Image (spheres, rainbow, N blue to C red):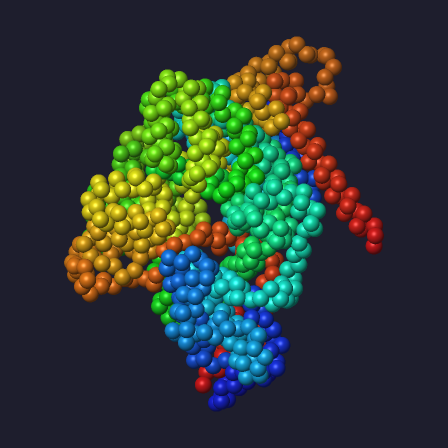
Amino acid sequence: MSEQSEEAMLTYYKRLFPYGPYFRWLNYGNMKEHYFHNREFSFTLPDDIYIRYQSFKDEAELEEELKKMKPQKIDLGAVYNHRPKSHRSITNFVPMEKELVFDIDMTDYDDVRNCCQGADICDKCWKFMVVAVKVLDVALREDFGYQHLLWVFSGRRGVHCWVCDDAARALDQSARSAVAEYLQIIKGGEQQNKKVSFNHEHLHPAISRAAGIVGHHFESMMVEDQDILGNEEAVKKFLLMIPDEQLKIKLEKAMLNYHDSISRWRVFEELTANTGKTKRQILHLKEEIMLQLTYPRLDINVSKQLNHLLKSPFCVHPKTGKICVPIDPANVEEFSPETVPTLSQLINELLELNSESLGKDGKSLKEYERTALNPSIQLFKKFLSNLESSWRHKRIIASDAKMEF
Amino acid sequence: MEFQSPRHSARRTVKNSSKLKSEYPHSLQLYSVPPNETIGLQELEDWAVERLKVLRAIERVNLSKNARFSDDWKNALKNDLQKQNLNSWYQLSSSIKDEKMDELICKTRQKDHVSHFLLRLAYCRTEESRRWFISQETDLFRFRFSMENSEDIRVFMKENKMNFQPIPEEEKKKILTKLIHAMPFNANKIDMVEYYKVPFTEALDLVRHRKVYLQAGYAYVPNEELVSIITAMFRSHLSLAMALTMRSLPELEDDHRIRRLLNDFDKRYTGQDFNALQNKSSGAAITPEMLDGLSKQSYPLCMRHLHETLRSTHHLKHGGRIQYGLFIKGIGLSLEHSLKFWREEFSKNMDIDKFEKQYAYTIRHNYGKEGKRVNYSPHSCIKIINASVGPGENHGCPFKHFDAAVLRQKMATNRVPQPAIQEIVDLVTRHHYQIACQRYFEATHNTELDSGIQHPNQYFIESQKILNGEAKEKPKGAHKVQTIRATLPAKVEKPDTTDENDEILREGKDNHFLIFRLHGNHRTNTRFQHMIGVTIMYT
Ligand code: SF4
Ligand SMILES: [Zn+2]
């Protein structure tokens, strides 16, 4: 059974889905007219029936509709110039704004992870996601000045980032693609072994910062956990990334004198420590290799397009039943997909809740705040209150401006 | 401006020179306002043809091995233009204080202005032609820009409200190391470099290629990269304008004279888009069973690789499905056949149900049966070469996206003779991917082609022609095979990513170039006037 039962979904939308905070988020302080109303939602119903261009007037209508339709999955699209629901009757129906989004999925790491493949994940390969969050979070904040980043677990094996700053939501397509390409350094398909190359004397500040972060994790996650130099075949595969033939031969000989990943990695470090000075092609070889193996792999088409849909936060993942909960980027290392609550777990909690907490005080708490979902809701609320203070600030400026007249 | 009777026999095309001078104060133009002239149809066409020659000269020079905008590149372009008597197109600056010269220059500026607006019309109709036009025009602008002195540039920037201020010395000192590390050029002269702090959205090309230091949403742009910002502004103005021009085109085409003029241009200079071309040469419809054979005989390497990957792994990622799916549509595979072909292959690895739900959509989409219902054109080489190809993906152009060793091996398997392999790999290292593809064609067909390959479907058609004996197979050195398209640059830079998509059609952005101008009661061609602001006299 790959879908959640209708009954379970109904319970979710009736008692667990955090409508209040969710609406506060997408309404963006009502700073722009019809912002919520012109937002595209799309639903996946049982049997893979997919309906696009849904839109809702307000929180109440959204709630009503979710309870009625019980979608297996909710995707969020752009804010359009008109109501998506009536898009057929409008000749000039175009997307106006959307969060700048990033999508990182573990399947894109299949050629660099040895622990699992495809849909599977484990704690070892989850570290790729940890690195991805760290690298992108700091780049978006420091380089682009964004502050309101909502990181979300995608429900199975990846993460999404929603950049919600006003300026980010207003970016046009070409700006989005420039940002995505700035952040994308791994280039090359199946037939290209070296996918990261820098040939200037210095590394760009953003790259050296990323190399620093990656370097921090590299030995434990790649050399130890993934055992990238564990056998002869692995060494051969690793050496395909060496662009210089002489060096490659030298390395192969020296590395195969040892029998474990760590010692072989040390050999690589030693032998390449000084060669770079003489040959431009291998000047940044170590960084390039570390980055090729661990730098975030973005699906940049998702980021580039204004009207691309992305699975909404607080969705139930149809296959795993896990809730797509926010992740705190400052404590991303503590997050484990293993501990994310599943729908059935939450429903069990609700059952207990009824029998146990009857009559006790707790009226002010929503039901979802009394389950394992609560920490995620609190995190989301923290994100919201930062976001809201930025609008408050703007409102004050706006009203001050009016007073002057 | 005064209304001029169309019956007036004398062609009065030029305003008095002092007026012209005040209208065209600068050699560089952003072409934001349409001209306001009365011009004869013949003259109009002559001017447009001249401009086209200039743009084609730029295209040719881009095909040469000179790095773009290097001194060699500029000289090559100047030579080319001189040969065709078109020097006036770059001698627009009036450093020479001479009445006669001044007048001539102003007239040329006017010609520049009017012809630009006319060509916009001819080139706004398809994405491909818009892209081509925008790209050549932007190069022309940058070429002219590079010949201005700094004083002229300052005036130009001021006139166009580009107020960039260099950052103060202390600010520069604070972030000096970062600035040096972000510099693509030699750091020795850092003291001389002035930096401008601009919102990163105004320096997208520099951001995209990580050529600037970014901090908190601002890009620190060294003065020698300023030209790239100004060029980018030019480019984005133009793509917006082109998109809006296209929207207004249907009205305009009511006038049959204009239509004839434009159609003519279109046919002569932009070629076809290879959308759903029937395989006329063989007469028979293409069926899935024929693809294995065709892929060996007539596919360019990019498509052959996708075909073989699909056959061996029974899967292609999204980028591959689009690139290959559109190509086989272009060679004449019907939607039904296409669905059958993909279904058979994919279902070796997944159940048919999953295929129908997840993949059939894209295929129908390619044929314009889903989504926006646009009948998409097969991708051109430039698009394929510039595609971003990630881990696990197989689309793109092998000459660009394969490691040299892999490429060699692939070619050897496909029985390309060793000397040709070497030659091709050399071309590839110099980034001449399309010329490499042409050599590959020649080596596998034992013939010669006039120009580079611009489109995988063009490659296919050429190949079929030869195999079906339509074009006589010619040994090297004999009379050359006709190609069907004008050449496009073999060496390409990243194209402008402001795709001419819906997004820039947003209403409310400045569309002042569509200003409505009525010239008296000159009814027959008022629509044309609205578009390019000139009144035509039919004499
Ligand atoms: S040059 Fe064009 S046709 Fe040739 S392989 Fe590359 S993309 Fe394909
Ligand atoms: Zn794993």
Picture quarter containing residue A387? top right
Q: Quadrant of the C terminus of chain B?
A: bottom left
The x and y percentages for residue B208 are 52, 46
Judged from this view, the residue extending furthest toward the bottom is B9
Q: Quadrant of residue B270?
A: bottom left
Q: Foreground: B181 or B26?
A: B181
Answer left or right for B99 relative to B258: right
Q: Is residue A222 above or below residue B526?
A: above
Q: Whole-percent x and y of residue A381?
A: 67, 28
Residue shown at the point (43%, 56%) measured from the top left: B67
Query: As drawn, is B408 to the left or to the right of A88?
Result: left
Q: Is residue B456 left or right of residue B234?
A: left
Give the vertical position of A95 relative to B97 (above or below): above
Residue at 61% x, 48% y is B220
Residue A140: x, y in percent? 59, 38
Q: Looking at the image, can residue B195 be seen? A: yes
Image coordinates for residue A236, horizontal then vertical, percent: 33, 27
Q: Is residue B156 visible?
A: no
